[in-house]
Amino acid sequence: MLLFGNRTKTKTYSKTQSDYLKIDIFDEEDLKFWCKRFNCTEDALMAAVNIVGVSANKVENYFNEN
């Protein structure tokens, strides 16, 4: 989903503050970053996003509770 026009992502693990708000499960680099951040598999991350949505805070809370 495109929210802010055509913005190309730089392929790096360095994220800006706004990048921490949502998880893009369709971006390979984003998947790796968030799996490392939450210490989970890609399948577990995708399942969490399907349950609580793309908000990084909600996904983090989900993993903390389960």
Image (cartoon, rainbow, N blue to C red):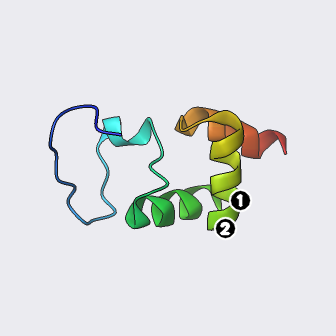
Q: Is residue 51 found left or right of 55 in the rendered image?
A: right
Which residue is at the far right? 66
Q: Which quadrant of the figure contains the N terminus?
A: top left
Nearer to me, 65 or 22: 22
Q: Which residue is mark 2?
A: 41
Residue name at image x 22 percent, y 55 percent: 9
Callout 2 amino acid: Thr
Q: Secondary structure at mark 2?
A: loop
The answer to whether residue 5 is above or below residue 15 is above
Q: Residues within 10 Å of mark 2 (few under 14, many from 20)?
A: some
Structural distance between the alpha carbons of marks 2 and 1: 5 Å
Q: Is residue 28 found left or right of 61 in the rendered image?
A: left
Q: Residues within 10 Å of mark 1 (few under 14, many from 20)?
A: some
Callout 1 amino acid: Ala
Which residue is at the far front? 1
Residue 36 visible = yes
The answer to whether residue 6 is above or below residue 10 is above
Residue name at image x 62 percent, y 65 percent: 42
Residue 11 occupies which quadrant of the picture?
Answer: bottom left
Q: Residue 27: percent from the left, percent from the top?
A: 40, 60
Q: Which residue is mark 1?
A: 44
Q: Residue 63: percent from the left, percent from the top?
A: 74, 46
Q: Which quadrant of the figure contains the C terminus?
A: top right
Q: Residue 50: percent from the left, percent from the top?
A: 66, 44
Contact check, label 2 and label 1, Cβ < 8 Å: yes
The answer to whether residue 53 is above or below residue 31 is above
